[in-house]
């Protein structure tokens, strides 16, 4: 499905699908509390939304939100469950808590964000995309797979604010 992969399912369609980050804005997301380091790639927006099925083990900056490291609310997504039928890079996202740090590495600098909240949202909620005058980072992924419907019941949104540039 376009929103994520079902635990235990056959996701062979995603084998070999990748999109390379542009050399002009090569960035990485690091989450020390979860021992994660992921490339950030751009995910274009279409009238139907964002197709993140091809992300694999990468994080995707969702076009339409603020560009990473710029003022505004940057929304980054990754899979909770991967096409390889293993936990995805954002599988443990709900374990992040207040003041945990998240880094974006870009252009020779490290942008340090501090977690301010984590919440469950309805799949149709757009609150994760709320505008901000500050440099904010929102990590979003699926949560709560429903076997009966074959859909995820919620989205996990982790919000963080820029506290330092190194």
Image (cartoon, rainbow, N blue to C red):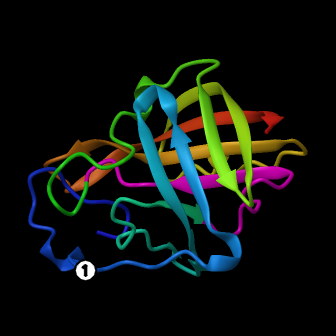
Name above or below for residue 136 compared with residue 129: above
Residue 144 falls in which quadrant of the image?
top left
Query: Which is more toward the observer, 75 or 114?
Result: 114
Residue 98 sits inside the magenta stretch: no
What range of the chain is rendered magenta? 62-81
Which residue appears at 62% of the width and 25% of the height? Answer: 117
Query: Which is more toward the observer, 115 or 133?
Result: 115
Q: Which residue is mark 1?
A: 16
Residue 134 falls in which quadrant of the image?
top right
* Left or right relative to 122: residue 116: right
Q: Tell me the crowding category of disc 1: few under 14, some 14 to 19, or many 20 or more residues within 10 angstroms, Cα based.
A: few
- Asked if residue 123 can be seen in this view, the reply is no
Which residue appears at 50% of the width and 60% of the height? Answer: 39
Which residue appears at 46% of the width and 47% of the height? Answer: 37
Quadrant of the drawing holding the N terminus: bottom left
Residue 66 sits inside the magenta stretch: yes
**What secondary structure prevails in the magenta region?**
loop
Which residue appears at 20% of the width and 76% of the height? Answer: 15
* Percent position of residue 36, x then y: 42, 41
* Percent position of residue 143, x then y: 35, 41
- Asked if residue 15 can be seen in this view, the reply is yes
* Left or right relative to 125: residue 166: right
Residue furthest toward the front?
A: 108
Label 1 residue SS:
loop
* Percent position of residue 147, x then y: 14, 48
Quadrant of the drawing holding the C terminus: top right
* Percent position of residue 154, x then y: 40, 42
């Amino acid at each position: 499905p376009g929103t994520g992969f079902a635990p235990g399912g056959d996701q062979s369609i995603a084998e070999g699908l990748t999109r390379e980050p542009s050399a002009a804005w090569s960035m990485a997301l690091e989450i020390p509390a979860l021992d994660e380091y992921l490339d950030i790639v751009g995910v274009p927006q279409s009238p139907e939304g964002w197709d993140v099925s091809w992300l694999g083990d990468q994080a995707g900056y969702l076009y339409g939100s603020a560009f990473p490291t710029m003022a505004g609310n940057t929304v980054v997504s990754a899979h909770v469950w991967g096409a390889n039928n293993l936990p995805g890079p954002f599988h443990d996202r709900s374990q992040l808590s207040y003041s945990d740090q998240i880094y974006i590495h870009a252009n020779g600098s490290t942008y340090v964000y501090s977690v301010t909240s984590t919440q469950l949202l309805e799949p149709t909620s757009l609150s994760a995309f709320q505008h901000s005058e500050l440099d904010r980072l929102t990590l979003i992924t699926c949560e709560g797979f429903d076997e009966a419907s074959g859909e995820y019941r919620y989205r996990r949104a982790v919000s963080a604010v820029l506290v330092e540039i190194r």
